[in-house]
Image (tube, rainbow, N blue to C red):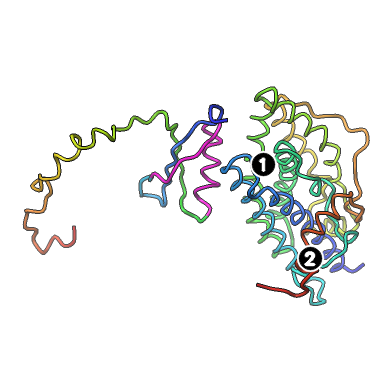
């Protein structure tokens, strides 16, 4: 593994997280419970898509084999995607979607903060400057919802609790490193994910306290996405995400 | 649904120094969520840098059916417009 291989793999992993979650959130467009949130969710999806594009474009450059952002996003096989399992989880109800977004954003916000302030990589610092603000808003938007749903009606509180029970065991994977990430951390390019755990735990704990939710103990965390082992839902997601490029190779409009 | 998410009127200020302008309305559970929805619905294209939201129920409006007695009497009082003064050229554009 050369340094550029490591950077390429690390970038791919981060970009895949953004792309897959963006796709999931975009599934709400036209289906959200109210018009205001329909636009809100679409905005969140677009933020993530923009970050994914910048990361894929940079990854293609680092790889140096002429692959474009589209090639990397649309023309890989399921086992080659390195996103964590959390982001590929189906939308479920609104509580599931908004909690998944909070879990992810509470990790990515300090991640980009670290990159913007400390990274030795100028291009990544540029991406982080924009992404950091976007993820701060995601934390705020989703956090406000989690508080209101958790401390809302009997129905909303029950759904919020179900979402916590359905998703919390996927969060540990956010902090799982990889050889590529560790190599990049050694170069001071990216943070070691484990170093962000305390901040994430504090953010979630604070929001859950206001939302009257308990942080569950997880005996068996679910992992595998970071080494390309995905759940059943990932194949369905990719079938839709990649359909146009597979059906009409090299199409553009 | 509507009782849990009342209507709010949204005001956006496009730039520092300008005033907030009414841009529309939306439904939200409370003021904080109304601000967030206003951000998502009304500032997607860089329309502003400040948002006000006001519960629509707090606005007292004039009655449309009494529009004639309220507003028609002003129609023929052109002398209330300051258009009958000669403005010296040195003043420039006002």
Q: Which residue is mark 2?
A: A74
Quadrant of the rendered structure where residue A55 is? Answer: bottom right
Q: Is residue B42 magenta?
A: yes
Q: Which residue is mark 1?
A: A139
Q: Residue at 73% across / 48% down in the picture?
A: A108
> From what the image shows, is residue A78 above or below residue A146?
below
Would you say A99 lies left or right of A174 here? left
Which stretch appears magenta?
A: B22-44
Please give the chain letter of the residue carrying mark 1.
A
The single residue placed furthest to the top in the displayed view is: A154
**Crowd band around label 1 with a 10 angstrom C-alpha radius: few (<14), some (14–19), many (20+):** many
Q: Quadrant of the N terminus of chain A?
A: bottom right
Q: Is residue A135 magenta?
A: no
Q: Choose the circle earlier in sequence order: 2 or 1.
A: 2
Disc 2 with disc 1 on a shared chain: yes
Quadrant of the rendered structure where residue A3 is? Answer: bottom right
Q: Position of residue B45 (x, y in %)?
A: 51, 56
> How many badges with numbers are in the image?
2
């Amino acid at each position: 593994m050369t340094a550029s291989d490591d950077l390429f793999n690390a970038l791919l992993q981060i970009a895949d997280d953004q792309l897959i979650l963006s796709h999931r959130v975009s599934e709400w467009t036209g289906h959200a419970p109210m018009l205001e949130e329909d636009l809100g969710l679409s905005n969140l999806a677009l933020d993530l898509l923009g970050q994914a594009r910048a990361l894929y474009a940079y990854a293609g450059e680092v790889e140096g084999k002429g692959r474009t952002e589209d090639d990397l996003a649309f023309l890989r096989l399921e086992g080659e995607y390195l996103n964590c399992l959390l982001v590929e989880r189906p939308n479920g109800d609104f509580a599931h979607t908004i909690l998944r977004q909070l879990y992810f954003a509470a990790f990515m916000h300090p991640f980009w903060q670290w990159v913007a302030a400390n990274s030795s990589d100028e291009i990544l610092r540029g991406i982080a400057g924009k992404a950091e603000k976007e993820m701060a808003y995601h934390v705020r938007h989703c956090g406000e919802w989690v508080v209101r749903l958790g401390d809302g009606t009997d129905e909303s509180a029950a759904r919020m609790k179900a979402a916590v029970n359905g998703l919390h065991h996927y969060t540990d994977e956010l902090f799982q490193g990889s050889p590529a990430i560790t190599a990049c951390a050694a170069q001071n390019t990216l943070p070691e994910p484990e170093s962000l755990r305390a901040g994430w735990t504090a953010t979630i704990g604070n929001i859950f306290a206001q939302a009257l939710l308990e942080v569950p103990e997880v005996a068996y965390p679910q992992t595998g996405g970071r080494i390309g082992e995905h759940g059943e839902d990932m194949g369905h997601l990719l079938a839709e995400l990649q359909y146009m490029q597979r059906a009409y190779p090299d199409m553009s409009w | 649904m509507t009782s849990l998410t009342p209507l709010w009127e949204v005001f956006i200020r496009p730039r520092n120094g300008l005033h907030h302008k009414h841009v529309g309305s939306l439904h939200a559970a409370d003021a904080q969520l109304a601000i967030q929805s206003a951000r998502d619905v009304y500032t997607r294209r860089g329309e502003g840098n400040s948002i006000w939201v006001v519960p629509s129920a707090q606005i007292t409006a004039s009655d449309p059916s009494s529009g004639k007695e309220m507003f028609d009497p002003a129609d023929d009082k052109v002398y209330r417009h300051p258009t009958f003064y000669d403005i010296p050229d040195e003043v420039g554009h006002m």
